[in-house]
Each structure stands twice: as structure tokens, then as C-alpha cells.
Image (cartoon, rainbow, N blue to C red):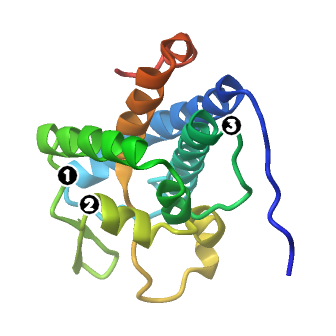
């Protein structure tokens, strides 16, 4: 079994990397949002769904790792969003939960997503469901041609990114400048 590695980067370097991936996801979000608004399938060549999901997963992973660095001074090498969240201090988890709930309440997500066969898949965006269903989304969803038939749709939207970013900036206001090109 491989021994887990510990990294001790500056929080700004981890946060800045997360900002880059979040910005990339935002740029790609346009066609996806149009498809959702029109009730069209989001899993099609005209919507860069898989690429967007991976960019979002990377940004969330880096934001969670940044919070871990702020909490503990280091982060590990896991890609599991679930494990990264549960490794945060209880105070940081509570802050993220409160910011996430406020965001979801103010920006209600769609209740379901259309699939190519016309069926719709319900979306559970409770924080625990999102973290659990995206334990290894970067690893599992980066190659859409390998997705098993009937696999759950990788979805957490921008909903988790802004609360995590806000939690980081609340802890270290100096990092806010790195995210100045992103929506508040």
C-alpha cells in the first residue's frame, strides 16, 4: 500500500490553482446553462459537460485542500472530496455548511437533469449527498467514454465553489485578490 504524502504549500498557491480551475469551469458553463434552460440533454457534444464537471471537481478539491492547509498547515494527496471535507476542523466544516446552505437557498438548483433518452434524473444537492457522490469525481469522471451506463450524473454545479471560496477568504482576506475576476 502506498504511503499517503503530505504537502505543505502556501495557502495562496493552492487557492490560486483552485481559482484557475473555477474560472475555466465558468467559461465553459454557458452552453450547459442554455441547454438546461431549454430542457435539452446536458450530456451532448454541444455542451462540454464532462470537461466542466472535471474542472469544477478540481476547483472544489483545491479549495478543500486550501482549507486543510489553513486548518492544519498541510494537505494530503487524496482526490476524495468527501474525505477532504471530513478532514477539516469542525469549525471549518460548520462554516462551509452555513455558506453552502445560504447559497443553495438563494440560488435553488434544478430539481432534475434531462438525459439523452428523454428521462430525467433527480438532483440531490444536500452537502452530504454532493460530497458523498463526488468522492473521486476527478478520477472517475475525467473520461466520459468510460462512464458506465446508468452511472450517476456528476453534478454539483457552481453551488459548492462559491461557498468554499468565501470560507477561504473569510479565513485569509489577503487571498481575495486572487479571485477578483470571479463572481462574488
Helix, strand or loop for disc 3: loop
Farthest residue to the right: give it. Answer: 2
Residue 39 drawn above or below residue 70: below
Position of residue 146 in the picture relative to residue 97 (left or right): right
Element carrying mark 2: loop
Q: Label 2 belongs to which residue?
A: 125
Taking the image as shown, residue 2 lies to the left or right of residue 114, namely right
Given this view, does label 3 or label 1 mark the residue nearer the observer? 3
Work out how far the residue at label 3 is from the one at label 1, CA to CA, in angstroms: 34 Å
Q: Name the residue under label 1.
A: 109
Residue 139 falls left or right of residue 165: right
Residue 175 is marked as: none
Q: Which of marks 3 and 1 is nearer the N terminus?
A: 3
Residue that lies at the very extreme toward the bottom in this rendered image: 149
**Contact between labelled residues 2 and 1, with CB atoms less than 8 Å apart:** yes
Marks 1 and 2, how far apart at CA: 8 Å
Q: In this view, does 140 lie to the left or right of 108?
A: right
The residue labelled by disc 3 is 73
Foreground label between 1 and 2? 2
Residue at 41% across / 88% down in the picture? Answer: 150
Where is 182 relative to 36, above or below? above
Instruction: Please tell me in which quadrant of the rendered image residue 11 appears.
Output: top right
The mark nearer the N terminus, 1 or 2, is: 1
Front residue of this view, candidates 136 and 149? 136
- Alpha carbons under labels 2 and 3: distance apart: 30 Å
Observer able to see residue 31: no
Q: What element does badge 1 sit on?
A: loop
Image coordinates of residue 157 in percent, x first then y, are 36, 50
Would you identify the image quadrant in which residue 65 lies? top right
> Which of pointers 2 and 3 indicates the residue nearer the eye?
3
- The residue nearer to you, when weighing 122 against 64, is 64
Amino acid at each position: 500500500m502506498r504511503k499517503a504524502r503530505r504537502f505543505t504549500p502556501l495557502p495562496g498557491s493552492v487557492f490560486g490553482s483552485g481559482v484557475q480551475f473555477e474560472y475555466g469551469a465558468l467559461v465553459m458553463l454557458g452552453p450547459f446553462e442554455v441547454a438546461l434552460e431549454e430542457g435539452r440533454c446536458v450530456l451532448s457534444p454541444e455542451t462540454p459537460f464532462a470537461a466542466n464537471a472535471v474542472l469544477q471537481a478540481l476547483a472544489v478539491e483545491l479549495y478543500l485542500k486550501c482549507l486543510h492547509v489553513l486548518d492544519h498547515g498541510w494537505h494530503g494527496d487524496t482526490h476524495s472530496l468527501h474525505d477532504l471535507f471530513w478532514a477539516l476542523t469542525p469549525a471549518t466544516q460548520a462554516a462551509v455548511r452555513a455558506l453552502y446552505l445560504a447559497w443553495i437557498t438563494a440560488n435553488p438548483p434544478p430539481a432534475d437533469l434531462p438525459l439523452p433518452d428523454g428521462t430525467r434524473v433527480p438532483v440531490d444537492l444536500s452537502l452530504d449527498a454532493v460530497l458523498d457522490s463526488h468522492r473521486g469525481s476527478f478520477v472517475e469522471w475525467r473520461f466520459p467514454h468510460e462512464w458506465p451506463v446508468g452511472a450517476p450524473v456528476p453534478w454539483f454545479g457552481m453551488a459548492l465553489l462559491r461557498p468554499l471560496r468565501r470560507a477561504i477568504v473569510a479565513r485569509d482576506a489577503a487571498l481575495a485578490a486572487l479571485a477578483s475576476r470571479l463572481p462574488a
